[in-house]
Amino acid sequence: MAPVSPKNAPSADGGHRFAVALQSALTIGDVEDAFFNVASTVIAAPGLGLYQIDATSGDMIDFKAQVDSDFLADYETYGRQDDPVLEFVLRQNRPVDSSRVVSRQVWEGCGARTALDVGGYYHSLEAPVIVSGALYGTMNFARPQGQPAFSEADITAAWLAGEHLGLALERALRYEQTDRRATRLEHVLDHVPQALVVTDLDAHVLFRNRTARSAAHNASTTALIEDSIVTAMEQFRVTSKRVCTRTAVEHQTRRRVVVKSFRLPGRDDAALTMLLDQTSGEAARLPAWDVLSKREQEIAELVSQGLTNKQIAERAFVSENTVKQHLKRVFAKTDVRNRAELMQRIWAAGGSGATGS
């Protein structure tokens, strides 16, 4: 059979509805639901199925179908291993129907045809679903014997539908992977003892960790903190600053909260703010500045600004290796284990140490 080219596909309202529905779907479940809701507008068939399969063995990984359960059970028992339509799709990576792949006699005698009969079907059309250049699974369409066999136009429509479905699934897989990574990150941040708030540069809160959600600030202090974050975001939007520190002081209680905001590395549209309550003992864990040399104090202050070793080396006119050696001594003298702990202690002091910066 000669391959069907997508460029020869007819323009139809059904194809447009199919594409719009799939591109509006966000998750894999949404994509699957959209397929079953609009697939009949592209190819008229009472039997519909979506299979995720192993490209090497042809074994089923997962499926969703709108057909009789008895048919599905019989197909998995003896139909899949003797299905010339599926075999062609796996071998050629293009759609085909039962009237074109083998002779009528061969089709009548195969296991797939026998299984189809259990569900009241006769004609079968399958198309590959390619995701990120690899076979993900198949789209399946079935018609009863009283209806016509699938046409060339149906095969062309299946080709195009498979391309739209593959793109939608690729996007959904990326979305779900990103969502899982974000969930894991939120779980980690919930175990950080300091209060953390992630916002966009318009100061809209995207995430608060558990400490920030449970922080016992009164309305006045909360308003001061929010104002500090808004001010920091304004500076980020109009300047090249990457770190902004403000101290929110509630005048009646004299409660002091250091609000330290910095842009997230590699992101120009979001920022992280750390809240350090100086009335709760955070400020007691300050570095022993008197034991640091003037150069070590300078390096520590540059670390608190969120600079990399390379950036610190350029500012201090030393090599990156010299910066690393200074940091090792700073960590040892201040009894901290890493840059993050050092930054927390400096921030607890409102961003200033013995250098007075």
Image (cartoon, grey):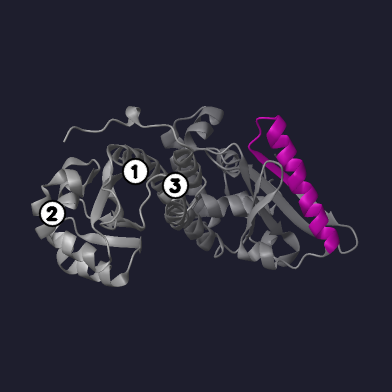
Between discs 2 and 3, the one toward the N terminus: 3
Report the amino acid beneath label 1: Gly
Q: Magenta span has 104?
A: no
Q: Which labelled disc corresponds to residue 41? A: 3
Q: Nearer the viewer, residue 335 or 338?
A: 338
Q: Position of residue 289 (x, y in %)?
A: 62, 50
Q: Residue at x 33, y 28 (%)?
A: 8
* Residue reaching furthest to the right: 252
Left or right of 246 in this view: 140: left
Q: Secondary structure at mark 1?
A: helix
Report the amino acid beneath label 2: Trp
Q: Nearer the viewer, residue 40 or 230?
A: 40
Whether 89 is drawn above or below 194: the answer is above
Q: Is residue 337 visible?
A: no
Find out whether the residues at labels 2 and 1 contact each other: C-beta distance under 8 Å: no
Q: Magenta span has 227?
A: yes
Q: Nearer the viewer, residue 274 or 88?
A: 88
Report the amino acid beneath label 3: Thr
Left or right of 260 in this view: 313: left
Q: Secondary structure at mark 3?
A: helix
Q: Residue at x 37, y 46 (%)?
A: 43
- Give the class, few, some or many, for how many residues have Cα within 10 Å of label 1's Cα (few <14, many ≥20): many
Q: Quadrant of residue 270?
A: top right
Q: Which residue is mark 2?
A: 107
Q: Secondary structure at mark 2?
A: helix
Which stretch did the figure color magenta? 219-245
Q: Which residue is mark 1?
A: 162
**Quarter of the figure with the N terminus:** top left
Q: Position of residue 331 (x, y in %)?
A: 50, 52
Q: Quadrant of residue 215?
A: bottom right
